Amino acid sequence: MSRHFRRTAAVVAAAVLAAAMVAGSPVAQANPTPDAAMPVPWNQVGDGWTLATWNPVAGHRPGDRPAPDEAPPAKAADTLFLIDPTGRRYAITTFEPNDKGWKPHLLDWSGDGGRALFSMGDDTVIVVDLHTGRQTSFPSRASARFSRPNGEAIVLSSRSQGQPSTLQRVDLAGNVQLTYPTENLAGAGRFGGDYLETPDGTTLVLSTANRGSEPPTDNSFVLMGNDGAVGRVLPVPMSGAVCRTTRWLAPTDFVASCTAQKSAGSQLWKVPLDGSAPTALTALNNAKNEPGFDGDYGDMDAWQLPSGTFVQSLGACGVVFLSRVTSDGHTQRVKVPRAGNNIDVVGSSGGSLVLKSTTGCSPSTALLSYDPAANATKVLLGPTVNDGRVVDAMTFGQGYRS
């Protein structure tokens, strides 16, 4: 028996034993079916499904030394998995290690469920056909996302220090189809680099920002047609703040993350596309560890479930965690069964959240499904289902419908 196998077996056994000893913390493991045992049921892929990249090299606790024959994560291939709501996983393709040690970063998932978008390093965009596993790429330093509704094109958002941000639509090979006119946005300032596209693909919501010595503007959101026609201006919901788009709460309501220009105060808002009054999702957080925000120095995003509204909170020293929004707009940290202190919210699925965190006795990152109403957690990928570590993950419709 190899040292690696003994170490893996010990970690898994310890996690199972610890789970059995903890009362009131229901933890389930997804059925560890073979990764390629069955074809993907493509007619079922959609809400409730998750994409994730996984590396076979397990993490180590501080002070632990890897086995002499263990390759570092950068030298091991990453596998892209498609995971159904029950935890059954399907291996789609692998990303082989490269001389620069770069790893693929998952950017987006097309609305038809058939393609995934990655960046590699800072100058390459990769399109993966999930049906075949085929990878194609083109050079770009811009931030890339699929067009809506079906991901038949790619939208590139580019920004650099001191320069106006730009927005282009290109085909899947990187050929320019349209350069959006972002220089003059109905008097609301220049394009700030953040945007959302409506689920039906007809409209873009652009954030705006002041640039250098330009006369200050109100930094409103601007609606733009898919053909580049400038439409309605939506005033920012927080006075004296810079606001950016984050994701959709509903097909006609998006989350805006606003930060005060002259302080550290921040707040999340729900903004309707029809121009009606925005609704505060959280109270103003001044990043001073004030009452009602214990350990929460700012919130990045929000998810509304039947069991309540949940936010991704920023803690001290780079820690991120899950919080529940209280009735007065403050936050309360959620203790997720068997999850570590660092919890990254991947997305939502029905009444559950999909999280990325360490679990059990393992120092490696796992993908978890968490039901807040039942306070129950299920491991979908990584320890203790198939060891290794989860690198990136995205729920279907993240930034689109989830």
Image (cartoon, grey):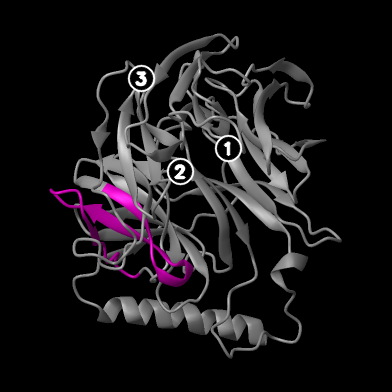
Measure the alpha-carbon separation of dots 3 and 1: 23 Å
Residue lying at 41% horizontally and 55% vertically, measured from the top left: 355
Query: Quarter of the image containing the N terminus?
Result: bottom right
Crowding at label 3, few (<14), some or many (≥20) Cα neighbours within 10 Å? many
Name the residue beneath numbered marker 2: 84
Farthest residue in the left direction?
327
Most foreground residue, 364 or 36: 364
Measure the alpha-carbon separation of dots 3 and 2: 32 Å
- Residue 313 is covered by the magenta coloring: yes
Q: Position of residue 284 (x, y in %)?
A: 27, 49
Crowding at label 2, few (<14), some or many (≥20) Cα neighbours within 10 Å? many
Amino acid type at circle 1 is: Asp
Amino acid type at circle 3 is: Leu
Q: Position of residue 159 (x, y in %)?
A: 67, 37
Name the residue beneath numbered marker 3: 273
Q: Which residues are magenta?
A: 310-338
Mark 2 lies on a secondary structure that is loop
Q: Earlier in the sequence, mark 3 or mark 2?
A: 2
Label 3 close to label 1 by CB (< 8 Å): no
Q: Position of residue 47 (x, y in %)?
A: 41, 34
Query: Quarter of the image containing the C terminus?
Result: top left
Name the residue beneath numbered marker 1: 108
